[in-house]
Image (cartoon, helix red, strand yellow):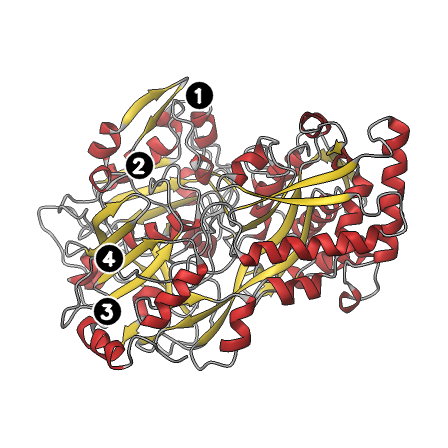
Amino acid sequence: MRLISVAEHLPRRESQPYQPMRRKRLAPAAGNNYNTDIMGNSITSFWRFALCAGAGAAVLFSVACSSGSSTTAENGRYTYRTTSSAIQTLSPTDWSLGGEGSIMAFLMSGLYEFVLNDTRDGTDIVCELAAAFPVDVTEAYAGAAPYGVPDTAREGYAWKIDLNPAACWEDGEPITADTWLYSLRELLNPTMKNYRASTLYESTFIIANAQRYYEGRGAWEDVGVIKNNDYSITFVLANPITLFYLQYRLSDLMLLREDRYEKGKRQTGDIVKSSYGTSKDMMLSYGPYKIASWQAEKELTLVRNDAWFGYHDERHTGQYMTTDISIQFIDTHATILSLFLQGKLDITALTTDDLARYGNSDYIQFTPQSYTIKLTFNSDFDTLRNEEAPGVNHTMLSYRDFRAAIALSFDRQEFVQTCFAGSTPGYGLINRSYIANPDTGERYRDTPEAVQALLDFYGTETEADITGYDRDAARTLFQRAYDAALSDGNILPTDIVQLDFHTYNADPTQMRRIAFLQDAVNRASAGTSLEGRITIRQITDENYYDNLKQGNCDVAFTLWGGSAYDPYGILWCYATDEAKNEFGFQPTEERLTIVLDGTAVTKTYNEWYTALCVHEYATADSRIRNTILAANERGLLSYYTMVPFAYQRSATLISHRIVEGTPDYINDLVIRGGIRFMAFTMDDAEWDHYCKAHNNQLAY
């Protein structure tokens, strides 16, 4: 991986000091087609800063434009046409859906970004909002109050970032050190409790005293964000960080426009919230594109942001050929596929049924993604009891044996092949996209600790033997769970067990998945006291992620993923009350003992998360960190409130006129080059003529 400094290419402004001054990361979405983001790439979120749920309200993220699009075909214009499920906000402080993160990536630039290299077979890191690469200034802050940098520290704690003096907002207002300080202070604002505040105090990038300020226990002046001059800032961190992970984290750090953010502030109960990012007038861009129009629930149109510095320097020549982006908010796959075949979109996700027809197409792409698809169960007895009616039982789900029986009852390989296009069977919470060592490229799943965790959990000698499928064992567990519930007085011999399975919609794909699971449960419970008595009822629920978190849902498909170069931070998704979907599981109470270097250490799952990502093990060697993560993964699986069964891989078709930066998938950082390197063989007018010549029925 090569570092490319760009300071020498930037115009110097004598009136503004030019002092010793992205990875475009798209987020997981909610939705239930489990396909791709707007670019047809993996939907990588920034844990929370870069971690998102995938499967709740938005992920069809294929690419399309309805016949009613307002985009006019013109010579010399290249409109990338796409679809998304509806979005809620584009605010850097509160976005949570994959679609939101994908769109925001068009509207921002990172301090640093990960891009295709010159030979388009690897990755380079380039400066964007930064004028030069970070300078380690740890020694200047060693022992200095109030940041807590150790007296003996020599590297990794403090980094000076010189800023690009050509960077500005779409209206020309300069982006300066003050812009950064305002944005970071508001992200941590203790009166607002912003969803993404922990971006600055968890995982590998922990700004000194940021959490104390966010919790109202400290002063902003003590937070490790320092203005050196108008175009230079320094980050002082609580834990040391490598240059790679610093640039990785800074590639997604986003800015707020102060006047719009302040204008949108309103008191909401006990906290203050801002409507920033909820309409065209309530936000501004500082990236390659800006919002031209925004019709909620219908369409979002982006155009080139001519104020963006990248269009006026020598470093972006030959990049960003796309002039416009049209995003229609459409959820129905049949509609999207139809539009694609008419030439009214540039990429479409494929379902399992589609693969039978297009699986050998010259235009098909398979893209590994960081998301693990799983069943999420509500295990809370009280909320399940509240759902019950005479003769209808829900509390069986509170029995671990019952949940384990469901997990063992279905053949994951067959389930994935028939119901999840392109994806592969998966057995761990963390899939094969995650890199434990960026220097060597070692995947977390290939580490000895991660391998052993799954072998131990599934009771096999080799990874190849893992199936997670054992109908006889499932039958035994169904009977044992029933006997326990009957003894406890929690089920009657005449009750049926009803599992309310919430999905985003009731399209044929969703119903096929439900039917598959129903058939598997029927087969596994045959010959038990529950034979013929377990019913899986599909319920359409666009807000099922929220309902899961509140205990108003029995079971659903969920996904977590993103930030594939930080597997340790994935624990946030399962070990914190704010993120977990598994109602009834208590990560702040359930405890896990891990033997580290011969010493047994016991903590709650939440404590293990903070120890691994914030406190004593945040900078431990990889063997210790992998041991902790693998033990937590195995422990979490043992509750059977989260049952992984697939590692997501998208299957997409790209249109005849699209040329990717490279035909080959490179890695999670750059995929195939993204919008930066995407090219068109025809402009909009030529494409419309081409489609009409083919009667708007294109062959793929």
Q: Secondary structure at mark 2?
A: helix
Measure how far apart labels 4 and 1 are at the Cα level. 36 Å
Label 4 is placed on what type of residue? Answer: Pro
In the shown orientation, is residue 180 left or right of residue 86? left
Image quarter of the N terminus: bottom left
Name the residue carrying label 4. Answer: 288
The kind of residue on which mark 3 rests is Met
User: Percent from the top left, x then y, of residue 93?
Assistant: 37, 37
Mark 2 and mark 1: span between their CA atoms?
A: 18 Å
Residue at mark 3 to residue at mark 2: CA–CA distance: 30 Å
To which residue does mark 2 refer?
Answer: 183
Task: Specify whether residue 136 is in view.
Answer: no
In front: mark 4 or mark 1? 4
Upstream in sequence: badge 3 or badge 2: 2
Residue lying at the far top in this picture: please name it. Answer: 270
Residue tagged 1: 216
Amino acid of disc 1:
Gly
Distance of mark 2 from mark 4, alpha carbons? 20 Å
Residue at the spot of label 3: 321
Instruction: State the residue in front, 584 or 250.
Output: 584
In front of the other: label 1 or label 3? 3
Point out the tag, 1 or 3, that comes first from the N-terminus: 1
Seen in the picture, residue 149 relative to 297 is either above or below; the reply is above
